[in-house]
Image (cartoon, grey):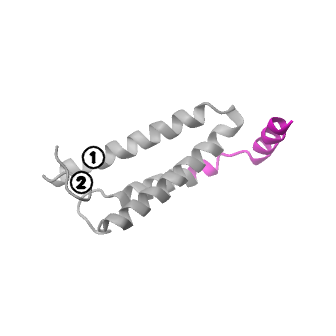
Amino acid sequence: MSGNVGGHPNSNGADMNTASLLRLGLFGSVAFLIASTLPQDLMAASLSSLLWVGAMVSALVAALLGDSLRARHLTRWDEAAVLMLASMVLGFFVDTQAVISQVETMRG
C-alpha cells in the first residue's frame, strides 16, 4: 500500500478508510495503555484528556494536509470528530472529587 503526499493510499476509498480506521484504533489503544498505568480514579480523566489532544492533533494535521471535509471516504477530520466525541462521552464519567483527592494525595 503506497501513499501520496497527504499520507493516504493511492488506490480507492476502501484503502483510505482502512488506513483511517487503523490510525484511529492505534491512537485509541496507545491512549488507553497510557491511561491504564495511572491510578483508577484518574483513568477516565486522563483518557478523556489524551483523546482530546489526539482530536486536536488530527484536526491540525487534516488542516495542514488540506483534507476535504466532504470526502466520500474517511479523513483525518472524521478521526478528529470520533476522538472528540469519545473524549466528551468519557468526560461524563469523571468523578471530579475523586480526581481532586487523588491529586492531593499525590502531592503529599
SS at badge 1? helix
Residue 23 x/y as whole percent: 35, 45
The residue indicated by pointer 1 is 19
Residue 61 falls left or right of residue 84: left
User: Residue 106 or 88: which is nearer the viewer?
Assistant: 106
Q: Which mark is residue 8?
A: 2
Residue 33 x/y as whole percent: 52, 33
Residue 42 falls left or right of residue 51: right
Q: Earlier in the sequence, mark 2 or mark 1?
A: 2
The residues colored magenta run 89-108
Residue 78 falls left or right of residue 89: left
Check the picture and name the quadrant holding the N terminus.
top left
In the displayed structure, 55 sits above or below 23; it is below
Assess whether mark 1 and mark 2 are in contact (beta carbons under 8 angstroms): yes
In the displayed structure, 98 sits above or below 64; it is above
> How busy is the neighbourhood of tag 2: few (under 14 within 10 Å), some, or many (20 plus)?
some
> How busy is the neighbourhood of tag 1: few (under 14 within 10 Å), some, or many (20 plus)?
some
In the displayed structure, 90 sits above or below 55; it is above
Q: Is residue 43 part of the magenta span, yes or no?
A: no
Residue 19 x/y as whole percent: 27, 46
Q: Residue at 69% across / 32% down in the picture?
A: 39
- Callout 2 amino acid: His
Q: Residue at 23% across / 51% down in the picture?
A: 16
SS at badge 2? loop
